[in-house]
Image (cartoon, helix red, strand yellow):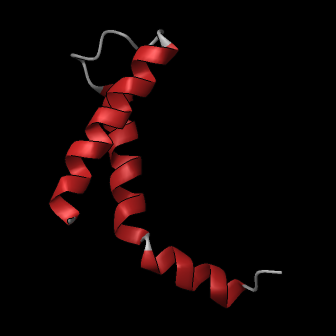
């Protein structure tokens, strides 16, 4: 079982990456230039691409 302090530790550890993930997701959905919102596969590929770009900064 995972206790609250462990959850917060894990969350804290990955907070910057999690924030980036959420930021990318929000940006991709609300971006005016984002035309393939209704296409799930396209959305998934777009987000995956953006996450890859973002995490190159962290390495």
Count the marks. 0
List x then y, in percent, for residue 51: 31, 44
Q: Residue at x 33, y 26 (%)?
A: 46
Q: Residue at x 19, y 54 (%)?
A: 56
Q: Is residue 37 above or below residue 7?
A: above
Q: Where, quadrant-wise, is the C terminus in this rendering?
A: bottom left
Q: Is residue 50 above or below residue 45?
A: below
Q: Residue furthest bottom?
A: 5
User: To which quarter of the image does residue 17 belong?
Assistant: bottom left
List x then y, in percent, for residue 15: 41, 70
In front of the other: 57 or 28:
57
User: To which quarter of the image does residue 20 belong?
Assistant: bottom left
Q: Residue at x 27, y 38 (%)?
A: 50
Q: Is residue 46 above or below residue 57?
A: above
Image side of residue 1 versus residue 20, left or right: right
In front of the other: 55 or 27:
55
Q: Residue at x 48, y 9 (%)?
A: 38
In front of the other: 52 or 29:
52
Q: Residue furthest left?
A: 57
Image side of residue 35 versus residue 59, left or right: right
List x then y, in percent, for residue 9: 54, 85
């Amino acid at each position: 079982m995972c206790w609250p302090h462990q959850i917060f530790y894990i969350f804290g550890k990955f907070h910057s990456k999690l924030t980036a993930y959420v930021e990318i997701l929000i940006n991709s959905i609300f971006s005016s230039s984002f035309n393939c919102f209704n296409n799930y596969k396209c959305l998934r590929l777009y987000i995956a691409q953006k996450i890859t770009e973002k995490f190159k900064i962290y390495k």
